[in-house]
Image (cartoon, coloured by chain):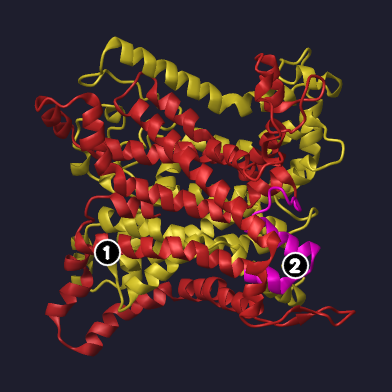
Amino acid sequence: MSADATTPTAPDAGGAPEAPSARRPLRIPGRKDSRGRIDTGLGAANGGDHGAPGVQGSTGVRVARGVLITVFMVLVLIPMYVLLVTSLKAPGDIRPSSAWSLPTSLSFEGWGHAWDQLGPPLYRSVILAVSAAVVSSVLGSLNGFVFAKWRFPGSNVVFTLFLFGMFIPYQAVMIPLQGMLLDVQGALPWFDGIVKLIVVHSIFGIPICTLIFRNYYATAVPTEMLEAARVDGAEMLRTFRSIVLPLSAPAFVVTMIWQFTSAWNDFLFALFLTTRNNGPVTYALNELAGGQNPDYSSIMAGVLIASLPTLLVYIVLGRYFISGLMSGSVK
Amino acid sequence: MGAGRATGPPPPPARATGPNRSIDFRTDSMTRRARNWLPGLLLVSPSILLVGVFVYWLITKNVLTSLQRSTDFVTDRVINPGGYRNYTQLLASSQYQHALFNLLVLTVVFLAGTMAMGLLWSVLLERGVRGEGVFRSVYLFPMAVSFVAAGVVWRWLLSPAQGEGQAVGLNQLFIKLHLPGLQNGWWSADSRFSMAAMALPAIWQLSGYVMALFLAGFRGISQDQREAARIDGASEWQIYRHVLFPQLSPIALSALIIIGHQSMKMFDLIYSIAGPNSYKAEVPATLMWTQLFSKSDAQAAAVNATILLILVAVVVVPYLVYTNKVEERSR
C-alpha cells in the first residue's frame, strides 16, 4: 500500500477535515486534489483510526452515529454471511427452515464441486483480465500523454468523443460487433472465446484509461520538464520514455486495477461473444447457478471463488481501486 | 469519469503553458507548428482508429440494421416495415412499454436509494469516527463484486416462496425475526411496481460508491467555513443545510448521472436474478437479448439498442458538455 510515491503521508489524512486538501499535491492519479482524502485508509490494512477532530457533537449524537454505522455495516454484510454459511453446509444440511443457521457440520463438498466447475474458466479469466489491463493501460498512457501535454488541433474534440465511448450502452454496438468478430473468426479460427474478449475489453477500456492518464499527467508531470526536453531537441517518444514513463507508475496501478476488475466482472460481452466451453468465470458462474436442481452449497462457494480475485485486489490495493472509481465508474 | 472532472478544483493551466502555446511564440511558421503536433496525432491514431471502428462505426451499423425491413422466412409476413416505422412499431408495442415502465421504476428507486444511503453514510462518517477505514471498506466492498455474483446471492435472498417450510432468503429471515408480515414476492410479485425490489441489490452494490463521492466532497470543504458558520450561531443542521450541502451539488449531479446511466444499461444483475426471458423483470436491456435470441429479430433488437443509446446520450452528453465548460472556465 505504501508504494504510492505521491502519497508520502497517508495516515495523517484520516479524518481531520480541517486540512486544506485542495492545496495539497496530487496524491492519486486520475483525480483532482480536493478529493485527496477519501482514498487514504480505504485499504483494509490502513485502519484510518485517528483522533477526534474538533467538535464532535454531544455524546448522544456520537452514540447514535456509532449505532447507525454499525447497523448499516451489518446490513451490508448480510449477503456475505449467506455466502459463507451456505457454502460450508453439506447438501443434506440445506433446508429452507435452517437457511440462516450456521452449518451443523463443516463440509467443503460445495467448494470442491464449485472448483471443479470453475477452475478452467477461472484460468481463462485471469488471462483475459491481465491482458486487457496491460493493453488498455499502455494505449491509455500514450493517449493521456498526448491529450495532456502534446495537443494537436481538434484534440479536445477527439478526447470528448473518446469519453462518450465510455458511457455508451454496449448493447448499441453488440449486434454488429458479434457479426464483425465472427467474420474475423471465419478467417482466423483461433480468434474465439477469450481472445475475442481480450480484444473487446482492451478497446473499450481505452477511454477510461486515457482519461485517468490524462488527468494524472496534467498535474503530475510539470510542463517545464517537457519544455526543457524540447529545448534539448528530444524527440516526443524519447521524452515520453525518459521523462513521462518513469513518473507513470501510480497511474498504471490505477488503470491496471480498474481494467482488471471490469474485465473480470464483465458478463454482457461474455454472454454475447463466448460459450460455456470457452467463456470466462462469470459465464461459468451463471451456468453453475442456473441449473434445474440448484445445489446451493456449490453455488454460493462458486460465487466466492469467482469473486475472490477482485475482492483480494480490493482489500490489498483498495485505495487505488477507489481512485479508479472516482475517475470513472462506468461499466 | 465525470465525477473527478466535474468537481475537482481548477486543473493546472496546462494549456496556457503547454507545449503548443510555447511553440506559438517561438515560431510563426505553419509547417514548424504542424511538425510539432503531428507526432502527437500519430501516437493517438491507433486508438482513434480502434475507438472509431468499435464505437462509432459499430453504432452506425447498428442504426442501419435498425432501419432495415424484414419479413418472415416462411410466410413472407412483414415483421419490420423498415425505416422510422421500425421505431414507431417498437415504441407502440405493449411489451416494450412494459419494459420501459419497469426501467423507470427501477431507475427511480435505484437513484433514490443510492443517493439517500450514500449521503447518509457519508454524513455519518465525514466528521471522523474510530475505525472509519474499516466501515468505509465494508460499505464499499460490494462494488468489487461482479453483478453476476451479486445477482446469484440476491436471487436467493429475494426468493418469492413464502411460509415456513417454503421460504428461504429474506422471507425466511422475516419469519425468524417474527415479522412474517414482511414476506413478499419481491420482484416477481403481482404489482406494477414490483420492479422496485430489483433495485435492492443494485442499491447494495453502489451506495458505497456514492458515499465515497460525497465523502470526498465533504473533505474538500475547508473547516474554516464550518467554524465561521458556528461563530455566526448556526446550528449543526443549519451548517449542513446552508453551508455544506450546497457545495456538494456538483457531486450529487455527477452521482446522479453515473448511477442513472448505469441503471439504464443494467443487464447482468437482472439477467442473473430473473433469468434470460423474464417478462416480470423485463427492461429494454434484457428485452434486447430476448429479441435477438428468442425471437431472432435483429432489427427490433437494434431499434431497442438505438433507443437505449439515445436515452443514455440525452443524459450523458449535456453532462459531458457541462463538465467541459466548467473545465474551460477554470483554465
Foreground: disc 2 or disc 1: 1
Q: What residue do we see at 27% from left, 53% from top?
A: A220
Q: Amino acid at mark 2?
A: Trp
Does residue A61 lie above or below B259 as drawn? above
Cα distance in 3D space between marks 2 and 1: 46 Å
**Residue B246 in sight in this render:** yes
Label 2 neighbour load within 10 Å: few <14, some 14-19, many 20+: few
Residue hosting label 1: B325
| In the displayed structure image, the side of residue B156 where residue B200 appears, left or right | left
Q: What residue do we see at 26% from left, 13% from top?
A: A58
Q: Secondary structure at mark 1?
A: helix
| In the displayed structure image, the side of residue B262 where residue B249 appears, left or right | left
Residue hosting label 2: A190
In x, y percent, where is residue A330? 49, 53
Q: What residue do we see at 27% from left, 79% from top?
A: B36
In x, y percent, where is residue B107? 53, 48
Q: Amino acid at mark 1?
A: Lys
Between B38 and B215, the residue placed more toward the observer is B215
In x, y percent, where is residue A136? 50, 60
In x, y percent, where is residue B326? 25, 60
Magenta portion: prevailing SS class: helix
Between B105 and B42, the residue placed more toward the observer is B105
Does the magenta-highlighted stretch encompass residue B203?
A: no
- Pointers 2 and 1 within a single chain: no
Does residue B327 lie above or below B43 as drawn? above
Colour-to-chain, yellow: A
Q: What residue do we see at 70% from left, 74% from top?
A: B299
Does the magenta-highlighted stretch encompass residue B288?
A: yes
Between A158 and A146, the residue placed more toward the observer is A158
Q: Which residues are magenta?
A: B276-303
